[in-house]
Image (cartoon, grey):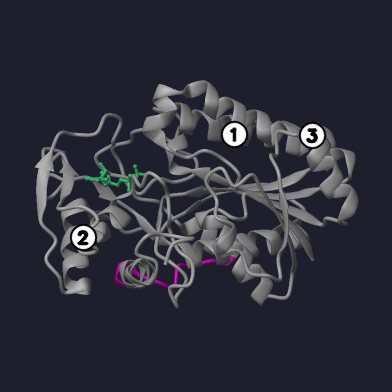
Amino acid sequence: MNILVLGGAGYIGSHFVKAALLEKHQVIVVDNLQTGHKESLPKEAVFCQGDIKNKAFLTSVFQKHAIDACVHFAANSLVGESVEQPLKYFENNVYGTMVLLDVMNQFHVKQIVFSSSAAVYGSHQVMPITEDYPTNPTSPYGESKLMMEKMMKWADIAYGIKYVSLRYFNVAGAWEDGSIGEDHRPETHLIPIVLQVPLKKRPHVTIFGSDYQTKDGTCIRDYIHVVDLASAHLKALAYLEKQHMSLTVNLGSQSGYSNLEILEAARNITNLEIPSMIGQRRPGDPDKLIASNTLAKELLDWTPQLDIFDIIQSAWRFHKAHPKGYGVE
Ligand code: UDP
């Protein structure tokens, strides 16, 4: 299959590209390299640098390559930044997706798998979260993902473009050999930040809040290995090929770890000291987010194969191999 991967040089996109090439698909990557890294792409992937909001550019890519399906990762994804700059999120995430759907329709490409997020749900008390929970995003980022989902729904009704919307919970980890991994600038996510301490890139980690309604007072999240996530996208493409039906599913492990548990696991895996302190709560953080993954099991035949140990260990391997991130060894 000829797969067009939008945002394929990003953290999750690059893991998907590698997994898709291993399954012998042809991969064409579009990325504006605003946050992605060209170094994360294998040479077998065709690379087209450009922005999905640029319709003429995107049209030229579809003209040059016979695309069978799209996998769409291209988006801004920082919750805090989205609160400060909401319009950036609506422009890049929502308008960008609109242009993509328009060009897909023009070229009769009828299949798309795309990144949604647990952020569409907002805060809920009862875990695990199933896909029929009300959606009430607490940030422009979550809102932009929900708007993308809604746009997909109407594009399906009007143009027959079938989609699988994958609502990711907390994605972490790296390719098993540490060749590619997470390199966000600035980094905001817990696991890479915790690992920056033993790498001597920061003196300690600050845990944001210890007065949440959880067993140890710190937030609980559901972590999913980026390699498991990549394989879910391949299963989603297979689902579209076979079922010709749209679908929205959670991707998570259905188990939760507190921030202190993550810290402790990282200390055990690195076997190094990781000093920490408790700081203020970060605005907008729900106490607990755990996915129900029953639907993904049933409909996509997908179950996570890797646990929190594999997640932190692979991330550690990547960070040790690339202490300064991509581009600088
Ligand atoms: N967190 C933290 N210190 C940090 C970064 C994150 O305590 O330096 C916490 C954050 O408040 C949340 C959890 O770690 O409770 C996971 O945050 P992350 O940004 O990794 O993912 P999110 O859940 O926001 O998608």
The CA span between labels 1 and 3 is 15 Å
Is residue 160 something one can see in this rendering? no
In the orientation shown, which residue stands out farthest toward the front? 328
Alpha carbon of mark 3 to alpha carbon of mark 2: how far? 44 Å
Looking at the image, residue 126 lies above or below residue 199: above
119 or 3: nearer the viewer: 3
Q: Give the mark, 3 or 2, whose residue is nearer the N terminus.
A: 3
Which numbered marker is on residue 200?
2
Nearest the camera: 276 or 293? Answer: 276
252 or 228, nearer to the observer: 228
Main secondary structure type of the part rendered in magenta: loop
Q: Which mark is residue 93?
A: 1
User: Image quadrant of residue 279?
Assistant: top left
Asked if 29 appears above or below 160 in the picture, the reply is below
Q: Secondary structure at mark 3?
A: helix
Magenta residue check for 308: yes
**Label number found at residue 267:** none
